[in-house]
Image (tube, helix red, strand yellow):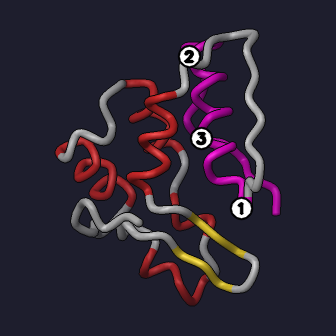
């Protein structure tokens, strides 16, 4: 699945394309996508594929297409004090974006720069 929008040169291009194709519709989802760079979830030798709207798998590592993640995030109606369970979370990319969105709702001034410990 995926390939609904053209590939971008960087994370911002990818997000602009997802917005143009109406996959990203809300400011909250846009902020989460911009705060979490998809390339950070790729192995170094495959990072050139990070900004394509395509699923990616390498061994046990799997990322769904960005358009799929944006549809999930737009469909979830998360509010402070609610939780979700992400089964088969793989790399943690979706969970990280959802957590960022949740934090930015609770703390509107929260920094978009997160530290990811590997």
Lower sequence index among marks 3 and 1: 1
Where's residue 102, x and y in %? 64, 23
User: In the image, which residues are magenta?
Assistant: 90-118
Q: Which mark is residue 34?
A: none
* Residue farthest to the left, as pictured: 20
Residue drawn 39% across the image and 58% down it: 11
Residue drawn 60% across the image and 73% down it: 42
Determine contact: label 1, label 2, CB under 8 Å.
no
Where's residue 23, x and y in %? 30, 42
Q: Which residue is mark 2?
A: 109
Q: Quadrant of residue 65?
A: bottom left
From the viewer's perspective, is residue 105 above or below residue 74?
A: above
What separation in Å lies between label 3 and label 1 (alpha carbons)?
12 Å
Seen from the viewer's position, the closer of residues 20 and 35 is 20
Lower sequence index among marks 1 and 2: 1
Q: Residues within 10 Å of mark 2 (few under 14, many from 20)?
A: few
Q: Which mark is residue 97?
A: 3
Q: Which residue is mark 1?
A: 91
What separation in Å lies between label 2 and label 3 (alpha carbons)?
16 Å
Q: Which of the two marks, 2 or 3, is nearer to us in this view?
A: 3
């Amino acid at each position: 699945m995926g390939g609904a929008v053209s590939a971008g040169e960087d994370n911002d291009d990818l997000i602009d394309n997802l917005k143009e194709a109406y996959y990203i519709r809300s400011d909250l989802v846009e902020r989460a996508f911009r705060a979490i760079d998809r390339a950070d979830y790729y192995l170094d030798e495959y990072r050139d594929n990070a900004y394509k709207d395509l699923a990616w798998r390498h061994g046990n590592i799997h990322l769904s297409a960005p358009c799929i993640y944006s549809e999930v995030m737009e469909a979830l109606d998360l509010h402070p004090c609610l939780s979700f369970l992400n089964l088969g979370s793989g790399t943690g990319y979706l969970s990280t974006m959802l957590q960022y969105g949740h934090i930015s709702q609770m703390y509107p001034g929260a920094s978009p720069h997160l530290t990811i410990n590997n």
